[in-house]
Image (cartoon, grey):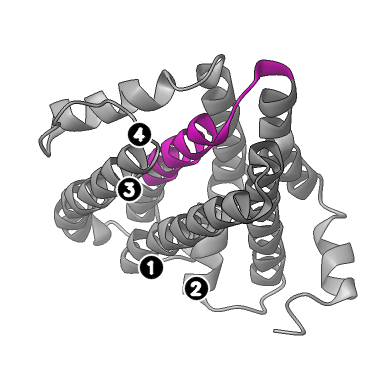
Amino acid sequence: MTRFFDPDLFARTYRDPMAWLTLLVDLLPVIAVVFFGWKAVPLVALYWLENLVIGAFTILRMLGTVAANILNLAVAAFMVPFFTVHYGMFCFGHGIFLSAFAGGKVGDPAPGFDGMRALVDWALGTGPYMLWFVAAIIAVNAVFYLVDYVVGGGYRETQLPTEMFAPYGRIVTLHVAIILGAGLMLAFGQPLLGVLILIMLRVAFGMAMNMLRRRRMDGETGPLAGAMAEAG
């Protein structure tokens, strides 16, 4: 763990403009809080929507393994739909928890396309300019996908199961961070301070993922850790 957070690794990580791009996008919610009046609800909704974006790019990476080995086509034909349903249900349950935690009125959405759409509509409506912040997240993920996975040849080095399991740890981490952030808000009695602390927790998570990505690029991590960095 000491090696993971050592100064040399930090310096190597942030010599890469891609790491700064991620940091910039991770800090964008500060603008939403300061200038657009966002509170905790739109913030956690944004992070939930980010999980959906991560899932979509995970599907693209899973499909990309077919380009490296045509034999993956048969496996992908099963695993991609399985991941779509399983991860979708995982995000659905997480979204129900968040909407209830935030006191949102989503009705009584049933699992499935309509239920997920209701949660997405709820999340997009929690704060002004939400769609622009989601677009920024999509853009930075697209850049990483093209640079690391397509141009950098990441599709030749990964495996379908590795890519499929990578995003789940991110949801668990976000879940814990939200509960921790809520506890800090109650402890300090300062909602704005609590929201900013939650953003900083997310920024710290993003920095950790950037350093994990650097270690993967330098051949210092296994495939699962590298895939988690790409998914984060």
Q: Disc 1 or 4, which lies upstream in sequence?
A: 4
* Label 2 SS: helix
137 with respect to 108 (left or right): right
Nearer the camera: disc 1 or disc 4: 4
**Disc 1 designates what residue?**
162
Residue type at mark 4: give it: Gly
Examine the residues drawn in magenta and state their main secondary structure.
helix
Instruction: Tell which tag, 3 or 2, sits nearer the viewer.
Output: 2
* Element carrying mark 1: helix
Tell me the kind of residue under disc 2. Answer: Pro
Q: Residue 90 location, x and y as percent?
A: 26, 52
Marks 3/2: CA–CA distance:
17 Å
- Contact check, label 4 and label 3, Cβ < 8 Å: no
Q: Earlier in the sequence, mark 1 or mark 2?
A: 1
> Which circle, 4 or 3, is nearer the viewer?
4
Task: Find residue 63 and name its label.
Answer: 3
In the image, 102 versus 212, the foreground residue is 102
The residue where tag 4 is placed is: 103
Range covered by the magenta-colored residues? 35-56
- For this rendering, which residue is in front, 225 or 197? 197
Q: Label 3 to label 1, Cα distance in Å?
A: 13 Å
Instruction: Confirm whether residue 153 shows in the render.
Output: no
State how far apart marks 2 and 4 are (Cα): 39 Å
Of callouts 3 and 2, the N-terminal one = 3
Q: Which mark is residue 223?
A: 2
Q: In the image, residue 145 lies at what x, y percent?
A: 54, 43
* Residue sitting at x 77%, y 75%: 5
Magenta-span inclusion, residue 45 = yes
Residue type, mark 1 in image: Thr
As drawn, the label of residue 13 is none
Task: Report the Cα–Cα distance between label 1 and label 2.
Answer: 7 Å
Q: Position of residue 19 (x, y in %)?
A: 75, 49
